[in-house]
Image (spheres, rainbow, N blue to C red):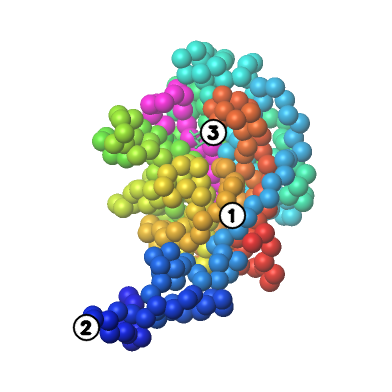
Amino acid sequence: MRSLILPMLMVAGVVVAETKPFPAVIPNEKPDFPISAAMERLYDEWNPHEDRANELYSNFKYTELNFKREKNVSRRDPTKVIKVDGIYHVWYTGRRTECPPVGLKKMTETQPGTDWDLADIWHATSSNGIDWVEDAAPAVRRPPKPEQGHRSICTPGILVWEGKYYLYFQAYNQVGGQEYCPVRVAYADSPNGPWTHHPANVVEPSPEGTWGNIKINDPCPVVHNGRILIYYKGAPIERGPEYVLRMQGVSFCDNPLGPFEASTLNPVINSGHETCMFAWKDGVAALVALDGPEKNTIQWSPDGENFKVMSMIQVPPVAPGPYCPTTFEGKGDGRGFTWGLCHINPDGGGAANESILARFDCDLSLDHDVPVFK
Ligand code: AAL
């Protein structure tokens, strides 16, 4: 609300606020003379000192990873990076097939429909976060038929909880536009495995007729207030323009093997494609990219359910997996991150080509004395 002690002018009996030119030195406080709607917003919604003073704003720099590009080999949707005994670890969707994706109508038992079809979960390690070495075989393989996920397991999210490791992933029996896809989990005592498939679904699509009733994509675990939160993208049956696709919800549990209980407020993010949530101060932040009216923003929520847009970002990483250890500490002191891995579709088509992994560098960290990439 505009201050009540505005300088007033009497014009033909009508009281109007005195206008003034906007000063060259941007005032710290909202001026008490008329300003435009954009300048009102600058004070009410944003920060008069621009994004350089905004801790949740950053630019992003990209570097391709050192993996050799091979025909019909795809790497995408990396987890967060974790560091254990001085070694960085990441997991991702890995596809090695006899041909490129042939589309949903032509796919066969051995020919993939999409880039994430006929996939397993692969693992790579690094001593410096720059040079990566991929294991010789998948870390978690598709389970045998008829177990859920026998066609493809993909788009993993890592959780470190009480000294154990949990990989959540999309589990498809059939990949396609309208196919049922719950989240499953595999667990291990070491990041090097061996991994054991948990035999039940841990996050189910939401009930018939609701926003996430077909698939749960991109499971993204965060620890907040002593609980495990799994964020995900939901997809309803596509029945025309009234359906807003690609919103994100959250489920809670105290046990990493679930079953997770959905927030009654879902969806909690109205935009975005792949999920990227991380602990920030005593709440949860989300990097929201690619789709929806609030794409290319960073948002924050004190409770993990009610998010506010904090910054607008340019060229954000796609499917980001940041290195942010505080995300699993659950101490209410999330410190953010300065780098991570993401994927790129160098040939343009998201579902029809091989993807590659890249490293991004940024400054979404509370631990930098001197801001970089702002
Ligand atoms: C990804 C994710 C989900 C989608 C597809 C594979 O980047 O959003 O996992 O289903 O693309």
The residue wearing badge 2 is 13
| Viewer-nearest residue: 95 or 100 | 100
Q: Position of residue 152 (x, y in %)?
A: 52, 27
Q: Amino acid at mark 2?
A: Gly
Q: Amino acid at mark 3?
A: Cys
Task: Report the quarter where the N terminus lies.
Answer: bottom left
| Viewer-nearest residue: 7 or 218 | 7
The picture quadrant where one finds residue 211 is top left
Total marks shown come to 3
Is residue 351 found inside the magenta-colored segment of the image? no
Task: Give the mark nearer the N terminus: 3 vs 2.
Answer: 2
Q: Secondary structure at mark 2?
A: loop
Task: Give the mark nearer the N terminus: 2 vs 1.
Answer: 2
The residue wearing badge 1 is 163
Q: Amino acid at mark 1?
A: Gly
Task: Report the quarter where the C terminus lies.
Answer: bottom right
The verdict on label 3 being within 8 Å of ligand 1 is yes
* Callout in the foreground (3, 2): 2
Task: Give the mark nearer the N terminus: 3 vs 1.
Answer: 3
Vertical relation: 179 (above or below) 88? above
Q: What's the distance in space between the residues labelled 3 and 2, CA to CA?
A: 70 Å
| Direction from residue 62 to residue 225 in the image, left or right | left
Residue 74 appears anywhere in the view: yes
Q: What's the distance in space between the residues labelled 2 and 1, CA to CA?
A: 74 Å
The residue wearing badge 3 is 154
| Viewer-nearest residue: 170 or 115 | 115
Region rendered in magenta = 154-181
Residue at point 48% right, 61% down? Answer: 310
Is residue 164 found inside the magenta-colored segment of the image? yes
